[in-house]
Image (tube, helix red, strand yellow):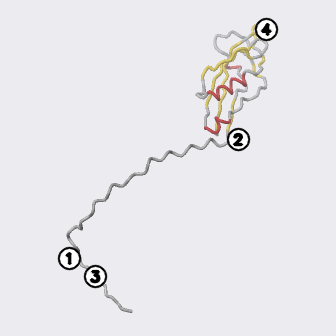
Amino acid sequence: MQETELAAITPTELPTEKPETAEMPEAKTAPAEKPAPREPPKPVTEHAKEYAEVTAPASVSSRAIEGTEVDQPPQMLVNPTPPFPDGAISAGRHGLVWLLVSVNAQGTVGAIRVRTSSGYSDLDQSALTTVRRWRFRPAQRDGKHVGCDVAVPIRFTIR
């Protein structure tokens, strides 16, 4: 085998002129890629539902609308809590909706409307649909059952 010597190159031996460079053709850009389609929301699992909570008042006795002249405001009976909509849980929507509920002399809900929205129609609708079926002990005036309007807060919370 033949050995070759490698001599050290000193800075004075380096070429000082720039070598001629051939013009490079402009690089062609690839066509713009379309963004990947969004994946559909994952189905809500029972585990996710554990972190969603709906809070309804235990009583509305102190929430009778001012100007309603009653001796005893309507009292809530045991009523179901509005369900937390699955789509709202997976989208991370939460909020507080205030409902204006007209409780008639029989203790059922006469009229109902959203007084202050949560900002999400699915949360508002869940509260409206459920509270519409609620039962109350009617308000009383002079010992008689009378109709009365009350404000009912429903809070949808994701922990």
Mark 2 or 3: in front is: 3
Mark 2 or 4: in front is: 2
User: Label for residue 113?
Assistant: none
**Mark 2 to mark 4 CA distance (whole Å):** 43 Å
Q: Which residue is mark 1?
A: 12
- Residue type, label 1: Thr
Q: Which residue is mark 4?
A: 144
Nearer-N-terminus badge (2/4) = 2
Closer-to-camera residue (15/148): 15
Q: Is residue 79 left or right of residue 158?
A: right
- Residue type, label 2: Glu
Closer-to-camera residue (6/156): 6
Residue at point 74%, 17% (across, down) = 109
- Residue type, label 3: Ala
Relative image position of residue 4 (x, y in whole percent): 33, 88
User: Label for residue 8?
Assistant: 3
- Residue type, label 4: Lys
Element type at mark 4: strand
Mark 3 or 4: in front is: 3
Q: Which residue is mark 2?
A: 50
Element type at mark 3: loop
The quarter of the rendered structure image containing the N terminus is bottom left
Label 4 crowd (10 A; few <14 / some 14-19 / many >=20): few
Closer-to-camera residue (111/135): 111
Element type at mark 1: helix
Residue at point 21%, 77% (across, down) = 13
